[in-house]
């Protein structure tokens, strides 16, 4: 079951915008300006692991100096992303296609039971009008440590001119929750040159979730070896892939993490913490109501148990658009290899069953 039709160049554009926005705090600092009125500041934040304070102003990140002035750090995101990418027509939102002038309706759901592909390349759209939910994959690892490395690897795997190196994600008949196939992700332990290892499949630029929307995500997971750090991400490509993630601690405890300019962890409050089991299929369902303030809703179920029910900030900024979803081993930062099977994935605006 694969839904969504989109032109490939749209995916390339949002990927490039995301790459431009990443790691902005690692860049050399630049010109110094006087602080503007606070009404012009989109966000004031302190990055994780730092004591420095930054301000976001019209897409630019500035470091706050001791005298209150602001020193340019990096262009963090494009504030005109919405205008450049989308257009409203008769009350509906469309993705612009500057190639031939065609407008493409945004997707409201993506689902896959991984029954219709024998190889990873079979799951990925190749032609501009392919009706496929997945637009790419990420294999970040010690042998493929940089953005350029894994983009090059992705291209040659899809073209059939090379194979996996260390990490891999692919359809398999080894086990399945329903039908005969599932997606198997294998991610080696991280290394000094690759502090996070990834083996995911992704849909970039297809979805559209904004402030006030509900996001439902459901998937069946079979943990076979090790422990992944995150297993599902929903992200804003235009803001350096900021977004919400289903997080797994090294001892298997599930939580929800906001990966953003300002990070936050939404943890289980119960004393008997629920863990992701090993050696059986487990159903993980996430529900978010999107907000850039603390009135957003975060709910997480494991099988028939609600393990998180809280409120908080679920968008990095008010104007953020969640347009990308990743599943699989979306991060492995622990000191061991991990193997995870994924099946019957759904991302939707509509409420999903917590159990089946």
Image (tube, rainbow, N blue to C red):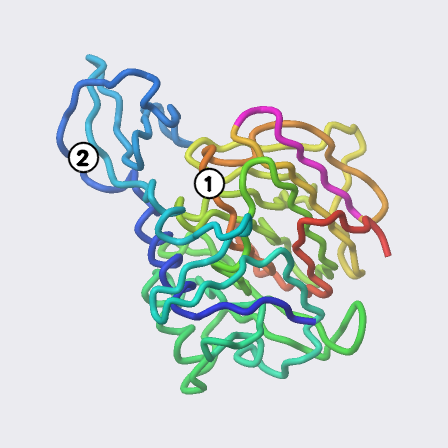
Left or right: 304 with respect to 72? right
Between the residue at mark 2 and the residue at mark 1, the CA separation in whole angstroms equals 25 Å
Residue located at (69% from left, 45% from top): 286
When the figure is inspected, residue 155 is found, relative to residue 278, above or below; the finding is: below
Residue 109 visible (yes or no): yes
Crowd class of label 2 (few under 14; some 14 to 19; many from 20; radius 10 Å):
some
Per the image, is 71 magenta? no
- Which is nearer the N-term, disc 2 or disc 1? 2
Q: Which residue is mark 1?
A: 320
The C terminus sits in image quarter: bottom right
Residue located at (52% from left, 30% from top): 292
When the figure is inspected, residue 221 is found, relative to residue 286, above or below; the finding is: below
Q: Which residue is mark 2?
A: 29
Left or right: 232 with respect to 176? left
When the figure is inspected, residue 215 is found, relative to residue 63, above or below; the finding is: below
Between circles 2 and 1, the one closer to the viewer is 1
Q: Residue furthest top?
A: 67
Residue 334 visible (yes or no): no
Element type at mark 1: loop
Which span is picked out in magenta?
Answer: 293-302
Residue located at (51% from left, 75% from top): 125
């Amino acid at each position: 079951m694969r839904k969504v039709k989109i032109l490939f160049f749209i995916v390339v554009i949002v990927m490039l915008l995301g790459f431009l926005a990443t790691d902005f705090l690692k860049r050399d600092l630049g010109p110094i300006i006087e602080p503007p009125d606070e009404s012009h500041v989109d966000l004031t934040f302190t990055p994780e692991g730092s004591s420095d304070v930054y301000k976001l102003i019209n897409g630019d990140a500035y470091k706050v100096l001791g005298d209150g002035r602001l020193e340019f750090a990096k262009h963090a995101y494009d504030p005109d992303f919405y205008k450049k990418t989308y257009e409203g027509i008769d009350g509906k939102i469309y993705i612009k296609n500057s190639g031939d002038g065609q407008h493409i309706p945004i997707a409201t759901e993506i689902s896959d039971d991984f029954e219709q592909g024998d190889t990873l390349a079979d799951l990925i759209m190749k032609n501009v009008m392919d009706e496929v939910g997945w637009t790419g994959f990420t294999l970040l690892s010690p042998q493929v440590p940089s953005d350029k490395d894994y983009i090059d690897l992705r291209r040659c795997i899809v073209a059939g001119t090379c194979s996996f190196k260390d990490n891999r994600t692919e359809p398999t008949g080894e086990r399945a929750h329903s039908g005969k196939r599932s997606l198997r992700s294998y991610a080696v332990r991280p290394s000094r040159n690759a502090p996070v290892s990834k083996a995911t499949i992704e849909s970039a630029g297809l979805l559209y979730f904004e402030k006030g929307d509900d996001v439902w995500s459901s998937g069946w997971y079979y943990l076979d070896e090790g422990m992944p750090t995150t297993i599902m991400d929903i992200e804003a490509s235009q803001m350096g892939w900021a977004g919400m993630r289903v997080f797994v601690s090294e001892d298997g405890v599930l939580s929800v993490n906001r990966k953003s300019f300002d990070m936050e962890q939404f943890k289980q409050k119960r004393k008997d913490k629920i863990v992701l089991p090993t050696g059986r299929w487990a159903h993980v369902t996430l529900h978010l109501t999107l907000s850039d303030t603390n009135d957003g809703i975060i709910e997480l179920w494991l099988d028939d148990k609600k393990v998180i029910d809280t409120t908080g900030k679920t968008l990095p900024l008010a104007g953020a658009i969640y347009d990308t979803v990743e599943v699989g081993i979306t991060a492995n930062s622990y000191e061991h290899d991990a193997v995870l099977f994924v099946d019957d994935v759904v991302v939707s605006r509509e409420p999903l069953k917590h159990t089946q």
